[in-house]
Image (tube, rainbow, N blue to C red):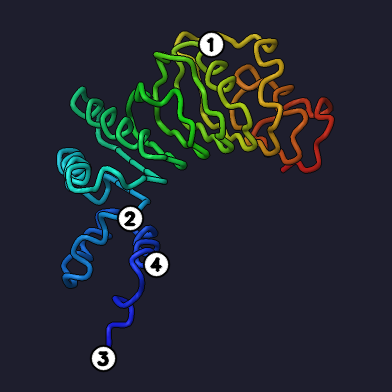
């Protein structure tokens, strides 16, 4: 029986492999010579620690990919999920991984785990989607600047102080979708609502699940679609078309 799948163009096969976790995509290399290095050209990388024995194996796999992959190939999407306990070794690896992809034309970045925000995530001219979960934000080394970022999801994020949240949002110039859940400030500070004035003028859709003291209502008062998981005063939402 003819292997018609292997006869497809490399770009089509890589697109198919992009829907698989990177570990599973790598296993296709044993199929034949045709597939041996094909997985290394996939533009979407997805590393989930639940598919590895421990963090050492998890990190080693990403390191090996960096060494094997052609440096001129872009990485359009990078997803890294780590549920193992935090350690300096883990954090250094994660910082390296994120720094690597931030210089490869990244458009979609999804980082989840018990870790500090990698310092290289402060500015990226190509990033369109940024999703962070379980992250501690204790500062930005440079000015935050995401000129084309349209989607920002923040879940279980702890900010050292409220100014860091304001600084992050102020760097999202054309943000259209914002989702927040379980945000908090380590020093227990309350955000002065006036510090959000003029932020996110392009925001269209918002899903907010945190106290009004963290995300003031007037920040989302002009959105077209709003999902809120707590009782707030909705009479201030002037342009609202949908409330869930």
Occupied quadrant, residue 170: top right
Badge 3 local density, few (<14 within 10 Å), some, or many (20+)? few
Q: CA distance from mark 4 to mark 1?
A: 45 Å
Vertical side of 143 occupied by 127: above or below:
below
Q: How far apart, in angstroms, are the residues tagged by discs 2 and 4?
A: 10 Å
Q: How far from the left and from the top, in percent, is residue 232? A: 73, 27
Q: Which residue is mark 3?
A: 1
Task: Residue 56 in the image: state x and y as whole percent.
Answer: 15, 38
Query: The N terminus is located in which quarter?
Result: bottom left
Left or right of 241 on screen, residue 156: left
Q: Count neighbours of disc 1 (C-alpha within 10 A) and say few if under 14, some if 14 to 19, many if 20 or more.
A: some
- Answer with the quarter of the image where residue 26 lies: bottom left
Structural crowding at the residue carrying mark 4, measured as other residues with C-alpha within 10 Å and reported as few (<14), some (14–19) or many (≥20): few
Between label 4 and label 3, give the one nearer the viewer.
4
Find the residue positioned furthest to the bottom.
1
Residue hosting label 4: 12
| 9 vs 182, nearest the viewer | 9
Q: Secondary structure at mark 1?
A: helix
- Labels 4 and 3: the sequence-earlier one: 3
Residue at 32% over, 47% down? 73
At 35% across and 62% down in the image, what residue appears? 14
């Amino acid at each position: 029986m003819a292997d018609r799948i292997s006869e497809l163009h490399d770009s089509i096969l890589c697109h198919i492999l992009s829907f698989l976790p990177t570990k599973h995509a790598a296993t296709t290399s044993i199929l034949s010579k045709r597939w041996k290095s094909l997985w290394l050209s996939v533009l979407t990388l997805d590393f989930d620690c639940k598919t590895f024995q421990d963090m050492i194996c998890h990190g080693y796999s990403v390191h090996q990919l960096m060494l094997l992959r052609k440096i001129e190939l872009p990485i359009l999407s990078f997803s890294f999920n780590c549920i193992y306990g935090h350690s300096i070794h883990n954090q250094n690896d994660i910082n390296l991984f994120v720094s690597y992809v931030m210089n490869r034309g990244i458009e979609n970045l999804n980082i989840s785990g018990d870790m500090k925000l990698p310092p290289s995530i402060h500015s990226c001219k190509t990033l369109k989607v940024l999703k962070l979960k379980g992250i501690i934000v204790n500062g930005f080394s440079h000015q935050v600047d995401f000129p084309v970022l349209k989607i920002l999801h923040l879940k279980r994020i702890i900010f050292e102080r409220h100014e860091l949240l304001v600084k992050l949002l102020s760097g999202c110039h054309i943000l259209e979708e914002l989702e927040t859940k379980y945000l908090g400030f380590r020093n227990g500070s309350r955000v002065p609502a006036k510090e959000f004035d003029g932020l996110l003028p392009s925001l269209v859709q918002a899903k907010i699940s945190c106290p009004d003291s963290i995300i003031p209502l007037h920040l989302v008062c002009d959105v077209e679609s709003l999902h809120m998981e707590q009782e707030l005063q909705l009479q201030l939402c002037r342009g609202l078309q949908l409330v869930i």
